[in-house]
Image (cartoon, rainbow, N blue to C red):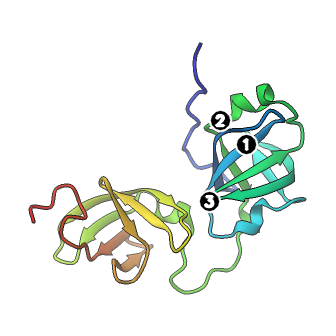
Amino acid sequence: MTGPQQPTLEPVEGFVPIGRIVGTFGLRGAVKVVPMTGFPDRFEEGKTVYLQGRPLKILRHAWHKTQVRIWLEGFKRIEEAQPIVGELLYVPEEDVPELEADEFLVRDLLGMEAYSEDGRFLGVVEEVLAAPAHDLYRIGGALVPAVKEFVVRVDLKQRRMVIRPIPGLFPDDED
């Protein structure tokens, strides 16, 4: 028996990823989703998300810690939901809300190079994790809190982030 296939992480033109399906929940086709957005209302009842290019309506949702469980139209049994574990959920690009200063879309941060204030390369932003207090950026094996004390500057044009790490934050730190 093989597990679910890895989804493509290539951008889908005209769409923005808002969450990754990480598992099933219960026997009635619900899925667990790790949000990739700072806008939790995207998962409310009646909203439309796109899965593998298909529009699907969210019938119900429930938050559990940092995940949201959603019930999508067309998925009534666990056997129907299991094949979509690992897939990304999208919304059309034109549905992206207006951002405040110092707010960024996850897609703009992924792959961005991160450097320390003294110019040392730390890695690239591999993942943005939504957490209750603030997002976390996975960079070079470290989880960096997305707060001004750690993230000094984000330059979208240069695709470069400047980090002020504390000793021991990154695995290669000698301190």
Image position, residue 89 (x, y; %): 70, 49
* Mark 3 Cα shell of 10 Å, populated few (<14), some (14-19), many (≥20): few
Residue corresponding to mark 2 = 85
Residue corresponding to mark 1 = 31
Image position, residue 133 (x, y; %): 52, 74
Q: Secondary structure at mark 2?
A: loop
In the displayed image of the protein, which residue is found farthest to the left? Answer: 174
Which quadrant is home to the N terminus? top right
- Residue at 71% of width from left, 62% of height from top? 93
Disc 3 from disc 1: Cα separation: 15 Å
Q: Is residue 72 visible in the rendered structure shown here? A: yes
> Which mark is nearer the camera, 3 or 1?
3
Q: Secondary structure at mark 3?
A: loop
Q: Sequence-wise, which precedes: disc 1 or disc 2? A: 1
Disc 3 from disc 2: Cα separation: 19 Å
Q: Are marks 1 and 2 in contact (CB under 8 Å)?
A: yes
Q: Which mark is residue 65?
A: 3
In the image, residue 53 sits, relative to residue 155, either above or below, namely above
In the image, residue 128 sits, relative to residue 163, either above or below, namely above
- Residue at 58% of width from left, 27% of height from top? 5
- Residue at 77% of width from left, 57% of height from top? 62
Q: Quadrant of residue 35?
A: bottom right
Image position, residue 52 (x, y; %): 73, 39
In the image, residue 4 sits, relative to residue 10, either above or below, namely above
Image position, residue 8 (x, y; %): 57, 38
Amino acid marked by disc 3: Lys
- In depth, the one of 38 and 7 nearer the eye is 38
